Image (cartoon, rainbow, N blue to C red):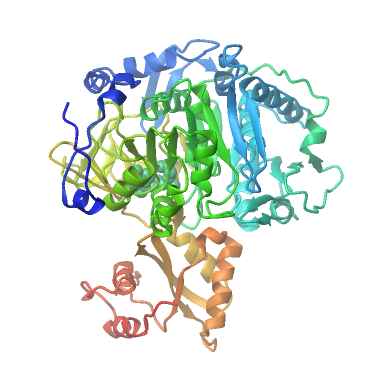
């Protein structure tokens, strides 16, 4: 197979449209090296997924692979299994002494948990949860830093058949309250705090605020992490270490139905209210297992590090479940990439001899900005495979990642998927696929993805859809079947609508362009323009708000808010600051607007719809598009004049 000659400079590469073939060495050892898998899987999708399912443990084998009554899918119907059993018990005694988790705290403290130890810790906490009255089917909210106890708590919930709902530690108390109330969690697991850039995040204090007054929460379990002072309410709040002390390390895994809810994960949609995405057990397990094995090419001696926070779906599927189902050793890091210095990630790779590294384009672009000197201080030669997720990766960042981090030799797997899809859907198979910088390449075998136009005809440029059910697909929006149907299954009545624009080139490669709806990606985090607008108009002085994403070279999108104030209120810079803080209070710091622009009016159509496209044009400094439907063209002129960055 043809191999590219080593490039001279990054600039040379960018001028070329070249393919990066897998090296012979990589190909020879790859978990998946037979290109025929694509055709075989397309011919018989069920057989493909059944073979994967057959490699895992089922207390009772399924009767039927799929029951599909659009939009409701049931996979491995009648089967009984347990994902925690498959992540832990299945590896014992063979991997008893093998590290499952290599953990490093931000201050530099370390902990290793072997498969045996992780099994025991999960057993103890499962028993503790039972003692607190958690039953099969209950929801448990986890609001925690990146500590091993977070993975332990997830696995313990799964072990006893309860569903976890992990809420990212960057969300505010109000956002946490909304998620707790929607899921009706009776119990919250948290920590006193977590370290981030040298500061202790007040997690327990946030929980106290989130469950004050009316709340379904009866108990709170608190991990002691930072040692900061916290209030412990007698009868409600319990220390983790006290709860597990004296518990048996053994707790039999509950054989749950394949369609038992495994977790809820809230994500932003196009309205002000986040959606509780429902994932179930059997299909999700099979999808995570298969994709992790083939896309990350996991081998017995790999040290695998996915840098995502477990609060996002990437952390669920590819920090915890996918790799542990494969018996891999995972690295887990608590803190920021620039603490104490900008080289922290590279120091971790060198120290633990990480072989497979999975991160986000936003992070890669930030590292590019910081400069090559930081990775060059470290020996990164253990790396053999790199991954990217969360947003489109621009070719320049791709090449930098390949050359500077991957020494020009590591394949890069650019993985497209969503909270809703559960596992990776479009990505290279690193031993087979010739890579094109910026393309997630092709759908994983057994995944029926396509690009179609507005009418649903096959197209080279249009919307990304999934035409057949897949094992890890969401099973709904918690408590809102109507919204589930209308968001995903109404644009095209037969297909799953992803909300992404996409191109397909002559070789059949997919180039995902990003969202076509009012969902923003800011530093890889998913936000809704409507959610931020609701937070702004919640403030008494604000009359109206329109939020858009302005293209940003590092973060993909920057949040720009156009705000009109009520009569008699003066639009001062101070008010701008107050409004930014108000958004942080309502949602969390991840949603803080970069720019707030006060205006006396928002551009609207005659029917009163805010013209966001025009606002985007203004924010990005473009010549204005069609404004003929505008009720008052003068509004745009004055907006344009007043627009300035702060
Ligand atoms: C949205 C889903 C995937 C798990 C983490 C984010 C965008 C994701 C890629 C990629 C281009 C990507 C899409 C998608 N996206 N991966 N490799 N190339 N775009 O999950 O928060 O649910 O966001 O992220 O726009 O719809 P999420």
Quadrant in the picture for residue 133:
top right
Residue 270 as seen in the image, left or right of residue 411: right
With respect to residue 358, does 179 lie above or below? below
Of residue 363 and residue 371, the one placed in the foreground of this image is 371
Residue 498 visible at all: no
Rendered residue at 64%/48% (across/down):
181
Of residue 606 and residue 499, the one placed in the foreground of this image is 499
The quarter of the image that holds ligand 1 is top left
Q: Quadrant of the N terminus?
A: top left
Of residue 629 and residue 12, the one placed in the foreground of this image is 12
With respect to residue 299, does 406 lie above or below? below
Rendered residue at 80%/33% (across/down):
243
Residue 558 visible at all: yes
Residue 68 as seen in the image, left or right of residue 15: right
What is the residue that sits farthest to the left in this orientation?
506
* Residue 293, percent from left and from top: 41, 24
With respect to residue 88, does 177 lie above or below? below
What is the residue that sits farthest to the right in this orientation?
234
Q: Quadrant of the C terminus?
A: bottom left
* Residue 415, percent from left and from top: 35, 38
* Residue 108, percent from left and from top: 64, 45
Of residue 450 and residue 469, the one placed in the foreground of this image is 450
* Residue 434, percent from left and from top: 22, 33
With respect to residue 613, does 403 lie above or below? above
């Amino acid at each position: 197979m043809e191999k590219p000659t080593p490039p001279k400079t990054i600039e040379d590469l960018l001028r070329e449209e070249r393919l990066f073939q897998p090296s012979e060495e990589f190909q020879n050892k790859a978990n998946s090296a037979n290109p025929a898998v694509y055709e075989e899987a397309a011919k018989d999708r069920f057989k493909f997924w059944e073979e994967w399912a057959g490699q895992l443990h089922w207390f009772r084998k399924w009767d039927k692979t799929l029951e599909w009554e659009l939009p409701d899918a049931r996979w491995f119907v009648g089967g009984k299994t347990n994902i925690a059993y498959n992540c832990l018990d299945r590896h014992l005694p063979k991997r008893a002494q093998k590290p499952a988790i290599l953990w490093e705290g931000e201050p530099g403290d370390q902990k290793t948990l072997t498969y045996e130890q992780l099994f025991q810790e999960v057993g103890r906490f499962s028993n503790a949860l039972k003692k607190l009255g958690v039953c099969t089917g209950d929801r448990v909210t986890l609001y925690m830093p990146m500590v091993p106890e977070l993975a332990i708590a997830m696995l313990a919930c799964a072990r006893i058949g309860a569903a976890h709902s992990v809420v990212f530690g960057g969300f505010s108390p109000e956002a946490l309250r909304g998620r707790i109330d929607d899921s009706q969690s009776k119990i919250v697991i948290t920590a006193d705090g977590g370290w981030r850039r040298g500061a202790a995040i007040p997690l327990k204090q946030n929980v106290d605020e989130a469950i004050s007054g009316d709340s379904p929460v009866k108990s709170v379990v608190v991990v002691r992490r930072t040692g900061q002072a916290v209030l412990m309410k007698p009868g409600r709040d319990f220390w983790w270490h006290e709860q597990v002390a004296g518990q048996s390390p053994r707790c039999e895994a509950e054989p749950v139905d394949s369609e038992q809810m495994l977790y809820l994960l809230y994500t932003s949609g196009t309205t002000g209210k986040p959606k509780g995405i429902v994932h179930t057990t059997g299909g999700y397990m099979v999808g995570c297992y298969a994709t992790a094995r083939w896309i990350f090419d996991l081998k017995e001696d790999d040290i695998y590090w996915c840098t995502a926070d477990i609060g996002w779906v990437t952390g669920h599927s590819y920090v915890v479940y996918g790799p542990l189902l494969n018996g891999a050793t995972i690295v887990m890091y608590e803190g920021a990439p620039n603490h104490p210095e900008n080289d922290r990630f590279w120091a971790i790779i060198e120290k633990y001899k990480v072989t497979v590294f999975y991160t986000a384009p936003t992070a890669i672009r930030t590292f590019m900005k910081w400069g090559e000197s930081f990775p060059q201080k470290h020996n990164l030669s253990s790396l053999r495979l790199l991954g990217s997720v969360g947003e489109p990766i621009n070719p320049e960042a791709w090449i930098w990642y390949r050359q500077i981090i991957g020494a020009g030799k590591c394949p890069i797997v650019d993985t497209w998927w969503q909270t809703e899809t559960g596992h990776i859907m479009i990505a290279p198979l690193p031993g087979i696929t010739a890579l094109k910088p910026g393309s997630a390449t092709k759908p994983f075998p057994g995944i029926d993805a396509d690009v179609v136009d507005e009418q649903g005809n096959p197209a080279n440029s249009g919307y990304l859809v999934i035409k057949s059910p897949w094992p890890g697909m969401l099973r709904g929006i918690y408590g809102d079947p109507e919204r589930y149907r209308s968001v995903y299954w109404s644009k095209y009545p037969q297909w799953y609508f992803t909300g992404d624009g996409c191109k397909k080139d002559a070789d059949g490669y997919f180039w995902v362009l990003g969202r076509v709806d009012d969902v923003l990606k800011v530093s890889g985090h998913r936000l809704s323009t409507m959610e931020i607008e609701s937070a702004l108009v919640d403030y008494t002085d604000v009359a109206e708000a329109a939020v858009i994403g302005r293209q940003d070279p590092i973060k993909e999108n920057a949040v720009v808010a156009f705000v009109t104030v009520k009569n008699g209120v003066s639009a001062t810079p101070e008010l701008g600051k107050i409004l930014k803080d108000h958004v942080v209070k309502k949602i969390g710091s991840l949603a803080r607007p970069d720019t707030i622009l006060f205006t006396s009016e928002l551009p609207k159509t005659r029917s009163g719809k805010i013209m966001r496209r025009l606002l985007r044009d203004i924010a990005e400094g473009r010549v204005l598009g069609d404004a003929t439907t505008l009720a008052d063209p003068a509004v745009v002129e004055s907006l344009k004049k007043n627009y300035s960055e702060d």
